[in-house]
Amino acid sequence: MQPVLFDSSIYITALRIGDEAALALRRLASDLPVWLSSVVLEELYAGAGVNDVHVVDRLERDFDKAKRILVPNLSDWTRTGKVLSQLAAKYDCEKVGRGRLTNDALIAMSAGRLGITVITANGRDFSKLAEFRPFQWKVNDPRRT
């Protein structure tokens, strides 16, 4: 059973669904072990409105209790820098474009290190990252499960 990790795009889409969010996420995971990236957690807190912070708090508490929060280590950070440099050279990305990809790259590099599959609604960026550092990922949308 290969564990999975939802990108923030999946959580954000699920939160917009409302009451069906938990069920939609369970369907995406298909009884696989689910991890939470600390990078995704940061993105969720940064984007949470006053009324949504308690949802993100509970998410953090539950994953911390289960000991399934993935935190990028030094090699993930350095690998991220190298991948972003290669991506910029191939696609002629400016610094702003690379900055936008930093969080996705950190998620991909840390998940790849542990063999965790990233589930995202953002296939464009993750497909580019996978060109330079193989990792397991797939595109899915909680609204369509």
Image (cartoon, rainbow, N blue to C red):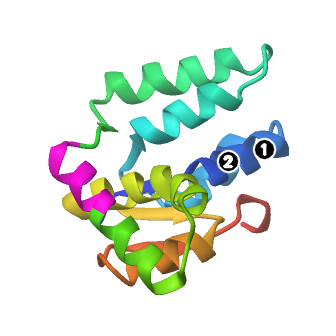
- Which span of residues is magenta-colored? 73-81
Task: For label 2, count other residues whose C-alpha is less than 10 Å away and answer few (under 14), some (14-19) or many (20+).
Answer: few
Give the labeled residue for mark 1: 20
Residue 23's label in the rendered image is: 2
Magenta stretch contains residue 77: yes
Q: Secondary structure at mark 1?
A: loop
Residue 135 in view here: yes
Front residue of this view, candidates 72 and 83: 83
The residue at the point 33 percent across, 22 percent down is 65
Q: Position of residue 102 (x, y in %)?
A: 46, 53
Q: Is residue 92 left or right of residue 31?
A: right
Residue type pointed to by label 1: Glu
Task: Give the residue drawn at x 66%, y 65%.
Answer: 121
Give coordinates of residue 120: x percent, y percent.
58, 63
Q: Secondary structure at mark 2?
A: helix
Vertical placement of residue 132 versus 11, above or below = below
